[in-house]
Image: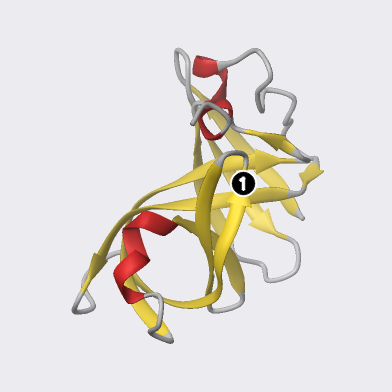
Amino acid sequence: MYYVESITESAVTRMLELKNESTGTVDLCFDDSAVVSDRNFEFMKQGNSYDCKIKLFGSIVKEKEERTVACSIVNATVCIGNSEFSEVVVKDDIYYIPKEKILNILEQDTILFKISRKDLIEVNDVIHEDLLLK
């Protein structure tokens, strides 16, 4: 579960500061779900907790650099909506990376991933509409 510490609204998107209640990790997550659907994550309110899935947006790198994390692949294929992801663990936190981004290196125990953004892709069983369109 993730506790919503703060929400910063923009014109049609927002950034949510989410704290993992199990690990204490705080993630700043992008939410553009209202751009694509009326069935979105706008029900999330500051001070409440939700079951969230967070996608790591970025790229595989060969060497550690700024904003790079070591990810352990725990499940090579997880379907969320109509999209395939790989479930990864960073320290004790679970995230999702689009499977096509790491398809050629799924046999590795650990990968280096440079994060440019973290996106909300599912909240309390509501799936981001982009993942239902494929």
- Residue with the mark numbered 1: 80
78 left or right of 108? right
- Residue 68 is left or right of residue 7, and the answer is left
In percent of width and height, residue 20 lies at 68, 60
Q: Position of residue 32 (x, y in %)?
A: 49, 26
Give me the residue at 77% from left, 45% from top: 50
Q: Spot the residue most to the bottom.
A: 109
Choose between 45 and 82: the one closer to the eye. Answer: 82
What percent of the width, then of the height, locates residue 13? Answer: 48, 22
* Image quarter (top left, top right, bottom left or bottom right) of the N terminus: bottom right
- The residue closer to the viewer here, 37 or 9, is 37
In which quadrant of the rendered view does residue 78 lie? bottom right
130 in relation to 76, above or below = above
| SS type, badge 1 | strand
Image quadrant of residue 39? top right
Q: Which amino acid does label 1 sit on?
A: Ile
Who's the residue at 40% across and 75% down the image? Answer: 106
Residue at image coords 45%, 19%: 10
Image: 129 above or below 89: above
Where in the figure is residue 86, as x and y percent of width and height? Answer: 51, 63
127 to 118, vertically: above or below: above
What's the residue at 68%, 71% (across, down)? 23
